[in-house]
């Protein structure tokens, strides 16, 4: 029996994770342009400087993220506009504002 290397196991797990993450937009299924624009204006516009740069977010940025998180995050994640959430700089902003992870999108899709 041949031993598999640790790196091979990690690579395999990353492929599985990428496959799961790739299905999230289809699971969410939100395509309403008006809702997408509302969510973009509500969450991304107040945070337009910190998301691409990782600079500390302003109070209005964090306030809007908290206010619209449940109704808008999954919608933005399914659209190109949500790409900033999954960058290292976006991660800094989300952590600074004490925001939850994307897992609630999966939970929401499974409930619907």
Image (cartoon, rainbow, N blue to C red):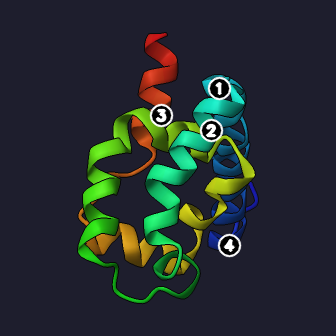
Q: Nearer the viewer, mark 4 or mark 3?
A: 3
Q: Quadrant of residue 99?
A: bottom left
Question: In the image, is 93 to the left or to the right of 8?
Answer: left
- Give the answer, above or below, for where 49 lies relative to 38: below
- Tag 3 residue: 105
- Tag 2 residue: 36
- Give the answer, above or below, for where 31 lies relative to 12: above
- Percent across and percent down for residue 105 are 47, 34
- Between discs 4 and 2, the one toward the N terminus: 4
Q: CB atoms at circles 1 and 2 under 8 Å apart? A: yes
- Percent across and percent down for residue 86 are 57, 64
- Tag 4 residue: 7
- Give the answer, above or below, for where 79 lies relative to 62: above
Q: What is the CA distance from the residue labelled 4 to the residue labelled 3?
A: 30 Å
| Helix, strand or loop for disc 4 | helix
Q: Residue at x 76, y 60 (%)?
A: 2
- Tag 1 residue: 30
- Between discs 2 and 3, the one toward the N terminus: 2
Q: What is the CA distance from the residue labelled 2 to the residue labelled 3?
A: 15 Å
Q: Nearer the viewer, mark 4 or mark 2?
A: 2
Q: What is the CA distance from the residue labelled 4 to the residue labelled 2?
A: 39 Å
Q: Quadrant of the N terminus?
A: bottom right
Q: Residue at x 65, y 26 (%)?
A: 30
- Between discs 1 and 4, the one toward the N terminus: 4
Q: What is the CA distance from the residue labelled 1 to the residue labelled 4?
A: 37 Å
Q: CB atoms at circles 2 and 3 under 8 Å apart? A: no
Q: Nearer the viewer, mark 2 or mark 3?
A: 2
Q: Residues within 10 Å of mark 1 (few under 14, many from 20)?
A: some
Q: Residue at x 62, y 55 (%)?
A: 82
């Amino acid at each position: 029996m041949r031993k598999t290397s640790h790196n091979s196991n990690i690579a395999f797990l990353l492929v599985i994770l990428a496959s799961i993450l790739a299905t999230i937009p289809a699971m969410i299924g939100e395509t309403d342009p008006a809702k997408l624009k509302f969510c973009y204006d509500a969450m991304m516009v107040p945070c337009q400087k910190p998301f691409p740069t990782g600079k500390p977010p302003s109070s209005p940025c964090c306030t809007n993220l908290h206010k619209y998180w449940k109704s808008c995050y999954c919608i933005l994640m399914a659209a190109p506009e949500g790409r900033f959430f999954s960058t290292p700089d976006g991660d800094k902003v989300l952590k600074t504002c004490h925001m939850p992870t994307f897992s609630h999108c999966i939970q929401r899709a499974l409930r619907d």
